[in-house]
Amino acid sequence: MYVGASVQTAVKILVVGHFGVGKTTFVGNISEIPPLRTEELITQASVGVDDLSSTPEKTTTTVAMDFGRLTLSESLVLYLFGTPGQERFKQLWEDLSLGALGALVLVDPERLDESFPVLDLVEQYGLPYTVAVNRFEGARSYSLEEIREALNLPDDTPVVPCDVRDQKSAADALITLVGHLHSRLD
Ligand SMILES: Nc1nc2c(ncn2[C@@H]2O[C@H](COP(=O)(O)OP(=O)(O)OP(=O)(O)O)[C@@H](O)[C@H]2O)c(=O)[nH]1
Ligand SMILES: [Mg+2]
């Protein structure tokens, strides 16, 4: 009803990552429909709980999900579901991961340690994934190989650079993920 008649396949993809890595920005920039957001203001109650040192301008956080849509080809449409970043919301993954074929894991090279609980969840739910490295300005330039090693990723897991604010870069990361999902079917 909402997508072109030639669309034969709809794929549910999760966009995941730790607090403030850029999930909402990613889904909002890439979605061809106005994204559904569940942002709430960050208040004093989060002092000492949510670390804003890397993103001092951040004023809101996702409390349920982001939702967007991207038609990748005439026959393929992606439905994108962004998760909240904090561990306290991880029970939402149970529902959000239902029917998902794969996950795009956003990581910030300066905060790799925060990505481990996220990678654990993705693996717990058995989701194939691609790692997209969102570099903030001023970050040291680790190579993708160094990041792969630091995160202890399997050899066949793709690692790609990604600027979540740039539509083409975000689309390229999703295309890599879809290619990875496809190669696992062969
Ligand atoms: N300077 C810079 N800012 C970025 C970059 N990527 C994201 N941001 C900013 O960093 C913040 C990230 O915010 P969100 O997109 O809300 O991150 P999120 O992962 O959805 O956060 P939670 O849902 O709260 O976990 C926003 O203020 C973005 O504009 C980047 O590459 N460079
Ligand atoms: Mg968010």
Image: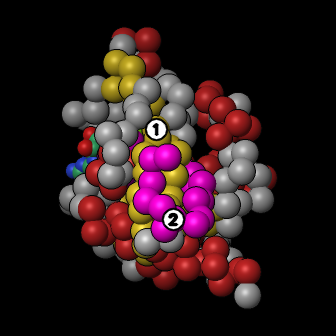
Residue 172 quadrant: bottom left
Q: Is mark 1 within 8 Å of ligand 2?
A: yes
- On screen, residue 130 above or below 45: below
Question: Where does the magenta region start and end?
Answer: 1-26
Say left or right for 148 vs 136: right
Q: Position of residue 164 (x, y in %)?
A: 32, 57
Which label is found at residue 173?
none
- Residue at (70, 36) in percent of width and height: 95
Residue occupying the far bottom of the picture: 186
- On screen, residue 36 above or below 150: above
Q: Where is residue 53 in the image (x, y as percent from the top left)?
A: 32, 37
- On screen, residue 17 above or below 89: below
Which of pointers 2 and 1 lies earlier in the amino acid sequence? 2
Q: Type of residue at label 1?
A: Asp
Q: Is residue 24 in the magenta section?
A: yes
Q: Position of residue 174 (x, y in %)?
A: 46, 67
Identify residue for label 2.
7
* Quadrant location, ligand no. 1: top left
